[in-house]
């Protein structure tokens, strides 16, 4: 596989949509090619960031509440720590 073919498969590879043999060839190219493996890492990071944003956007109220509680707990702890100073 060359870089052109690897770059065509890149987004499908990030999504885990390659067939077994495509993935095998793709990964073996990455192990030999710094450029493509760097590009693949970047693509994976970008995908993760997008995924996180989607999860945050869809966060259920229960999750938001528990995060708020956690934040309150942290604040209380900080105040207690100050009393002992
Ligand atoms: Zn390459």
Image: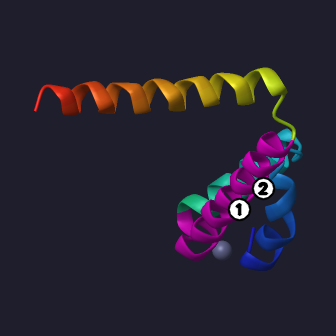
User: What is the quadrant of the N terminus in the image?
Assistant: bottom right
Horizontal relation, residue 12 to residue 23: left or right: right
Q: Quote the CA–CA distance across marks 2 and 1.
A: 6 Å
What numbered label is drawn on residue 71? Answer: none
Q: Residue at x 39, y 26 (%)?
A: 76
11 or 70, which is in the foreground? 70
Q: Residue 19, located in which quarter of the rendered image?
A: top right
Q: Which type of secondary structure does the marked residue at label 2 adopt?
A: helix
Badge 2, how many Cα within 10 Å: few under 14, some, many 20+? few
User: x%, y% of residue 81?
Assistant: 22, 28
User: x%, y% of residue 18?
Assistant: 87, 47
Vertical order, 65 against 55 (above or below): above
82 or 32, which is in the foreground? 82
What numbered label is drawn on residue 50? Answer: 2
**How many numbered tags mark residues here?**
2
Vertical order, 39 against 49 (above or below): below
User: x%, y% of residue 27?
Assistant: 66, 53
Q: Main secondary structure of the magenta part?
A: helix
Q: Residue 66, located in which quarter of the rendered image?
A: top right
Q: Which residue is mark 1?
A: 46
Q: Which residues are magenta?
A: 32-57
Q: Residue at x 42, y 33 (%)?
A: 75
**For the view shown, which residue lies furthest in the left direction?**
85
Give ligand 1's quarter of the image.
Answer: bottom right
- Verify CB contact (< 8 Å) between mark 2 and mark 1: yes
Q: Which type of secondary structure does the marked residue at label 1 adopt?
A: helix
21 or 12, which is in the foreground? 12
- Mark 2 vs ligand 1: CB below 8 Å: no
């Amino acid at each position: 596989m060359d870089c052109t073919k690897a770059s065509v498969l890149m987004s499908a590879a990030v999504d885990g949509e390659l067939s077994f043999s495509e993935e095998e060839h793709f990964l073996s190219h990455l192990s030999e090619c710094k450029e493509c493996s760097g590009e693949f890492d970047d693509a994976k990071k970008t995908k993760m960031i997008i995924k996180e944003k989607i999860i945050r956007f869809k966060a259920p109220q229960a999750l938001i509440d528990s995060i708020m509680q956690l934040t309150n707990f942290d604040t209380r702890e900080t105040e207690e720590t100050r009393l002992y100073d």
